[in-house]
């Protein structure tokens, strides 16, 4: 997480709105600032939605292009971050249907994978593989909180769903992942 | 009971604690609770493992720099080629004599000095020209997906490469919803989105399919989406009846936020006279993450005009020459496509068209330069830079040759090469003819 991103979160939505207003007047520096603030998390979200890093990078440029052109039409009914993620989501859907007639299908072997063996490395891999197989909304919530370091409330805003839904989805995800989690007795002394 | 209450309250804090985003107050609460709660310690350890896995899954990588060229619309993005129209070969796929390459480089430098001449892409659907602008434009043909030319047949005129607006957001003039001031809503009610039409499974949900209702908060189903922008232009995952509240179906694995209906309300006013403007399932079938099949959306459509017969350049267009084609896939509609026959009838064509081609305007103010080797060109000996010419090809004289474009301006003529300034849409096609060394004839324009 960059300093800029952390600063952006502290500054909150008012600062974002000010940026959008400047972008609407075609202030290039403002778009760069917004990009530094949200680019990383948008790229992560797009990568999850598109299953492909380079397609996500391309989609991210289109998202920023859309922001550049549409900043003036933002009606302020949601947080700026929510709006950005909504644009990203729409872009991902259209990229999915344009680029690939069929989406990648997970390896059947992974779905029926045996319980993980003892080595640390394969534990990690098995857990990551399990993470990849979570429903999108759960996986994106986990990514927003743990990889992008957002709070539950912020993640709910990004996903455009109620906070309680995020909580219940996270609990469901942990339930689904339990099989791949280590259950040693942990000494907290 | 009390224990359960405490666990319920502490679990979200554990999630944020493991992420390191919890505030100091919350951290103290968690730490004191962990002292004497085994199950929460286990839960926290599990969240930490999930956090580690999530961080490994999404390694922080450097952001690519912003593509300003693209953002400012300086790079045309080619997204779609009409069916049956092959992408044009580029200049560099042809073997070129060294002299020609040198000429190209020289020409490029010349363009730079002249301050422009490169293609400038205006490809923005939203910026379709208004009527005043159209008065200065001339209708010409665009390649059509429904053209009946056989694949072997050489088109009369090389169809230009089509460039379309890279974003696929709904057009600007479609307001998904009237402004909705969330702050003005009383605390015990919440807006929900209600279907105003019957929406078939697999259909693209259009703005006019939705309406907003205020209902008591405790009646709001889980996952009820209150941001219309998240729902319009997504795909319905089930048959949705008029009057149902739209929710995101979280119970469906990897549903990608696909809305489904949830029956709460009765009939909604306006559910009669259901207007079907979508074509369910016409976009083909795709597989989602779980390998299940689901219909692809058709996407946006537009009404366009098509030419009904082959017409030679210079003809005045009559009412019988064009026909309205509704619901044309928007990816295949060129910018500046004409939709109103009245604006077309009575105008003069500057290039020949084929039956089935989409009627579109070419903004005459956008030009591009085409480099041609003089040895392939037949032109009047007294031709001067600055004069305008009609460009003919594959014929010995204008009587048998085919008019490619009229009014091309000669802007450079030296060292065995010349440069013609032509409407931007014709640039790639003419350049390809030139690099194919097709015989080209220039005849002074009237």
Image (spheres, rainbow, N blue to C red):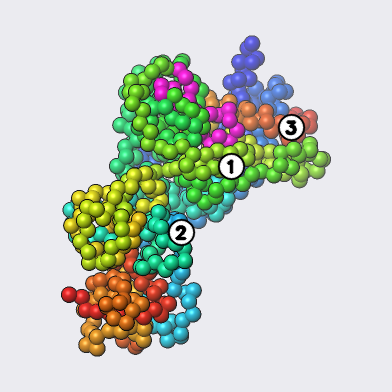
User: Could you classify mark 3 by the number of other residues whose Cα lies within 10 Å: few (under 14), some (14-19), or many (20 or more)?
Assistant: some
Are the residues at dot 2 and dot 1 in contact (C-beta closer than 8 Å)? no
Quadrant including the N terminus of chain B: top right
Residue that label 2 marks: B84
Discs 2/1, front: 2
Viewer-nearest residue: B376 or B370: B376
Q: Residue at x 36, y 72 (%)?
A: B430
The boundaries of the magenta stretch are B242-264
Residue A175, horizontal then vertical, whole percent = 67, 28
**CA distance separating discs 2 and 3:** 52 Å
Q: Earlier in the sequence, mark 2 or mark 1?
A: 2
Q: Residue at x 27, y 78 (%)?
A: B398
Q: Which of the 4 image quarters holds residue B40?
A: top right
Viewer-nearest residue: B376 or A33: B376
Residue that label 3 marks: A179
**CA distance separating discs 2 and 1:** 26 Å
**CA distance separating discs 3 and 1:** 27 Å
| Left or right: where B444 falls relative to B92 | left
Residue that label 1 marks: B287
Residue B223, horizontal then vertical, whole percent = 50, 26
Are the residues under marks 2 and 1 on the same chain? yes
- In the image, residue A154 lies in the stretch drawn in magenta: no
Q: Secondary structure at mark 2?
A: loop
Q: Residue at x 33, y 61 (%)?
A: B354
- In the image, residue B254 lies in the stretch drawn in magenta: yes
Residue B243, horizontal then vertical, whole percent = 41, 21
């Amino acid at each position: 997480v960059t300093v800029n991103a952390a600063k952006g979160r502290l500054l909150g939505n008012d600062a974002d709105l000010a940026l959008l207003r400047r972008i609407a007047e075609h202030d290039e520096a403002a778009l760069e600032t917004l990009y530094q603030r949200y680019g990383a998390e948008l790229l992560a979200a797009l990568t999850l939605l598109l299953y492909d890093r380079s397609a996500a990078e391309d989609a991210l440029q289109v998202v920023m292009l859309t922001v550049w052109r549409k900043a003036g039409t933002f009606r302020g009914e949601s947080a700026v971050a929510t709006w950005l993620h909504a644009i990203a989501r729409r872009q991902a859907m259209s990229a999915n249907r344009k680029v690939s007639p069929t989406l990648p299908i997970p390896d059947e072997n992974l779905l029926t994978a045996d319980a993980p063996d003892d080595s640390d490395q394969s534990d990690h891999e098995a857990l990551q593989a399990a993470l990849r197989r979570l429903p999108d909304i759960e996986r994106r919530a986990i990514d927003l909180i743990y990889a992008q370091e957002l709070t539950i409330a912020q993640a709910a805003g990004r996903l455009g769903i109620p906070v309680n839904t995020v909580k219940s989805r996270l609990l469901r995800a942990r339930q689904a992942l339990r099989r791949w989690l280590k259950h040693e007795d942990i000494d907290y002394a | 009971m009390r224990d359960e209450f405490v666990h319920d309250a502490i679990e979200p804090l554990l999630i944020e604690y493991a992420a390191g985003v919890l505030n100091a107050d919350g951290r103290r609460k968690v730490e004191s609770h962990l002292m004497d709660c085994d199950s929460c310690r286990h839960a926290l350890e599990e969240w930490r493992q999930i956090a580690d896995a999530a961080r490994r899954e999404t390694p922080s990588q450097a952001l690519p720099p912003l593509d300003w060229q693209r953002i400012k619309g300086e790079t045309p993005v080619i997204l779609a080629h009409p069916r049956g129209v092959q992408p044009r070969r580029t200049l560099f796929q042809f073997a070129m004599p060294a002299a020609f390459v040198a000429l190209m480089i020289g020409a490029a430098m010349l363009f730079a000095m002249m301050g422009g001449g490169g293609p400038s892409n205006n490809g923005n659907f939203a910026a379709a020209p208004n009527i005043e602008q159209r008065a200065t434009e001339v209708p010409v043909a665009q390649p059509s997906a429904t053209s009946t030319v056989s694949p072997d047949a050489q088109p009369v005129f090389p169809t230009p490469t089509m460039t379309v607006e890279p974003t696929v957001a709904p057009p600007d003039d479609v307001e998904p919803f009237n402004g909705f001031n969330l702050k003005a809503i009383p605390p015990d009610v919440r807006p929900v989105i209600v279907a105003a039409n019957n929406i078939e499974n697999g259909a693209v949900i259009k703005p006019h399919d939705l309406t907003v209702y205020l209902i008591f908060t405790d009646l709001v189903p889980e996952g009820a989406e209150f941001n219309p922008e998240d729902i319009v232009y997504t795909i319905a995952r089930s048959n949705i009846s008029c009057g149902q509240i739209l929710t995101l179906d979280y119970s469906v694995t990897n549903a990608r936020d696909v809305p489904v209906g949830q029956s709460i309300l009765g009939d909604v006013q306006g559910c009669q006279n259901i207007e079907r403007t979508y074509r369910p399932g016409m976009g083909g079938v795709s597989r989602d993450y779980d390998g299940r099949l689901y219909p692809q959306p058709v996407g946006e459509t537009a009404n366009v005009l098509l030419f009904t017969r082959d017409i030679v350049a210079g003809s005045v267009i009559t009412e019988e020459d064009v026909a309205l084609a509704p619901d044309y896939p928007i990816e295949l509609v060129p910018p500046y496509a004409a939709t109103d026959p009245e604006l077309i009838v009575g105008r003069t064509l500057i290039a020949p068209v084929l039956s089935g081609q989409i009627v579109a305007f070419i903004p005459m103010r956008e030009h591009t330069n085409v480099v041609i080797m003089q040895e392939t060109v037949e032109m009047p000996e007294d031709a001067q830079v600055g004069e305008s010419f009609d460009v003919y090809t594959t014929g010995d004289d204008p009587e048998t040759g085919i008019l490619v474009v009229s009014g091309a301006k000669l802007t450079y003529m030296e060292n065995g090469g010349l440069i013609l300034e032509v409407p931007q849409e014709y640039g790639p096609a003419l350049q390809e003819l030139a690099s194919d060394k097709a015989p080209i004839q220039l005849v002074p324009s009237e």
